[in-house]
């Protein structure tokens, strides 16, 4: 389903691309736009915010909205075609090397996708942890239920209900972050040598995990519009895999957010072909819009979607609390999951529960979303300015803070990676996001930190090295 604000945004975007609206041209005010289209003021605002997130328009304080300059508009990155087959992840050594380097905090933080400490509500978290410790019961200092503390599971269930997502507390399992949850579920649902369907390019950490678990992968092509659903259905129909690992909302690195229609279709395919969907929804709460996009699980009526997430991208990477929600088809795994799930620190669970119930988390998200949108826009604008005159393409998304940069065909991301490492700059080359070096001319950049002078200089160095290599 496409909402009215999205249709209106598409119409305005078309006028911008067709030069019917010129750079620096002032748009109608929100009230005037709402009157012209017989819509509410909030719908008009959502439309303009969506165009702003795509970098097509910008706002001037006390002046209104204007069309962005051409130099801040760019094509979206290509997605090379390929044949899908069952295979091993072949570059595990490189995966390990780059994953380790990406979290070195003394380097300029363009590598790992994580929020700046300045965007983390430290004082609010501190107060919630103090309140949680003050009101702890004696049993809270004993071993915790391995499914997770009832108080946090109830808090999460109530929090999701506000977004229209209904999960029973008994179906929620607390984990030490999202990746441990994914690893545990993959090990319980599949065995070594089994194939996992995975849209590509995909988060390099997932490929690293699958390789270490000795699982095969079947790559399904993806681009800025989403996943090749025909090919996904083909391999589900063939019975080539019993599990598909995917992100529907603001996927890393492409940034796409699947439409509700696409999500509903995937849930239907899972049921039809009895192929489980392991949904990593870690960026779901990092939308640039007020509404949180729904997960695939929302349309799952038969229990074939396992919904996973954590607060590591929306709150803090250091707060190692995640979850997974079990559907009815896998309830038989409950004893094994409980036996193998590693218990999570109880005070941290109770602190997060307090942060949710005190409205601190909801208020944090309401403040974070516009800040993220503005920050990502600033990164896009500066990258396009720094690389001006160089044929690049840069991702546009409606949420998350990963940027996918396509370089000229004669430049490899790995080449820039080694140059950047030598200068104390952290980036992730595209080569580790899929097989056959098909993304060797790409980079993924983190936009989770403020665009400081240090980061500007780092981006400028990347552009200068690229420009020099082309000459």
Image (tube, rainbow, N blue to C red):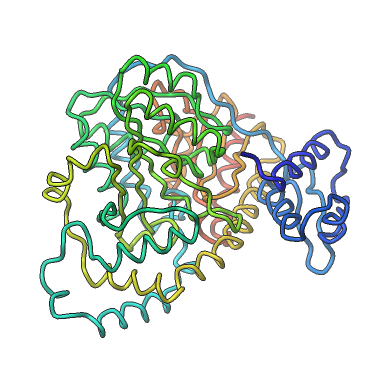
Q: Residue at x 69, y 44 (%)?
A: 6
Q: Quadrant of residue 315?
A: bottom left
Residue 190 lies, with reference to residue 249, above or below; the image says above
Q: Residue at x 25, y 65 (%)?
A: 150
Q: Quadrant of the C terminus?
A: top right
Residue 394 image offset from top left, x and y in percent: 61, 38
Residue 301 lies, with reference to residue 351, above or below; the image says above
Which residue is more in the foreground, 30 or 299?
299
Residue furthest bottom in the image: 134
Residue 284 image offset from top left, x and y in percent: 47, 50
Q: Residue at x 56, y 67 (%)?
A: 367
Residue 379 lies, with reference to residue 135, above or below; the image says above
**On the rendered structure, is 367 left or right of 57?**
left
Residue 67 image offset from top left, x and y in percent: 81, 49
**On the rendered structure, is 206 left or right of 27?**
left
Q: Quadrant of residue 11?
A: top right
Q: Residue at x 25, y 83 (%)?
A: 135
Residue 194 lies, with reference to residue 423, above or below; the image says above
**On the rendered structure, is 281 left or right of 26?**
left
Q: Quadrant of the N terminus?
A: top right
Which residue is more in the foreground, 226 or 6?
6
Q: How many marks?
A: 0
């Amino acid at each position: 389903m496409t909402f009215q604000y999205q249709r209106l945004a598409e119409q305005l975007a078309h006028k911008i691309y067709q030069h019917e609206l010129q750079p620096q041209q002032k748009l109608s005010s929100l009230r005037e736009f709402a009157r012209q289209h017989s819509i509410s003021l909030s719908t008009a605002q959502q439309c303009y915010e969506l165009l702003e997130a795509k970098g097509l328009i910008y706002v001037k304080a006390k002046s209104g909205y204007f069309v962005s300059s051409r130099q801040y508009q760019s094509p979206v990155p290509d997605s090379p075609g390929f044949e899908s087959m069952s295979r091993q992840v072949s570059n595990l050594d490189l995966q390990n090397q780059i994953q380790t380097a990406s979290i070195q905090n003394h380097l300029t933080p363009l590598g790992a996708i994580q929020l700046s400490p300045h965007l983390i509500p430290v004082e609010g978290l501190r107060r919630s942890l103090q309140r949680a410790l003050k009101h702890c019961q004696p049993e809270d200092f004993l071993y915790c239920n391995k499914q997770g503390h009832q108080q946090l599971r109830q808090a999460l269930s109530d929090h999701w209900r506000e977004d229209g997502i209904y999960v029973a507390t008994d179906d929620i399992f607390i984990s030490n972050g999202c990746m441990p949850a994914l690893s545990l579920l993959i090990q319980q649902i599949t065995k070594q040598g089994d194939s996992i369907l995975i849209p590509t390019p995909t988060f390099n950490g997932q490929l690293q995990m699958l390789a270490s678990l000795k699982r095969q992968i079947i790559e399904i092509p993806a681009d800025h519009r989403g996943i090749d659903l025909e090919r996904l259905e083909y391999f589900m129909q063939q019975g080539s895999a019993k599990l598909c690992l995917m992100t529907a909302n603001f996927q890393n690195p492409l940034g796409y957010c699947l439409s509700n229609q696409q999500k509903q279709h995937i849930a239907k395919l899972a049921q039809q072909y009895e192929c489980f969907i392991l949904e990593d929804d870690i960026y779901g709460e990092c939308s640039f819009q007020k509404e949180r996009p729904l997960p695939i699980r929302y349309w799952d009526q038969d229990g074939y979607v396992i919904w996973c997430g954590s607060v590591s991208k929306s709150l803090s990477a250091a707060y190692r609390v995640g979850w997974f929600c079990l559907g009815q088809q896998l309830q038989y795994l409950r004893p094994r999951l409980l036996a193998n799930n590693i218990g999570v620190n109880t005070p941290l669970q109770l602190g997060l529960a307090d942060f949710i119930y005190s409205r601190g988390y909801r208020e944090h998200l309401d403040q974070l979303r516009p800040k993220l949108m503005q920050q990502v826009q600033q990164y896009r604008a500066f990258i396009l300015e720094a690389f001006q005159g160089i044929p690049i393409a840069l991702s546009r998304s409606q949420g998350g803070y990963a940027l996918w940069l396509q370089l000229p065909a004669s430049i490899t991301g790995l080449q820039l990676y080694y140059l950047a490492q030598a200068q104390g700059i952290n980036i992730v080359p595209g080569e580790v996001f899929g097989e056959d070096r098909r993304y060797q001319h790409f980079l993924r950049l983190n936009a989770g930190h403020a665009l400081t002078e240090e980061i500007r200089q780092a981006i400028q160095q990347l552009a200068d090295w690229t420009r020099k290599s082309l000459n």
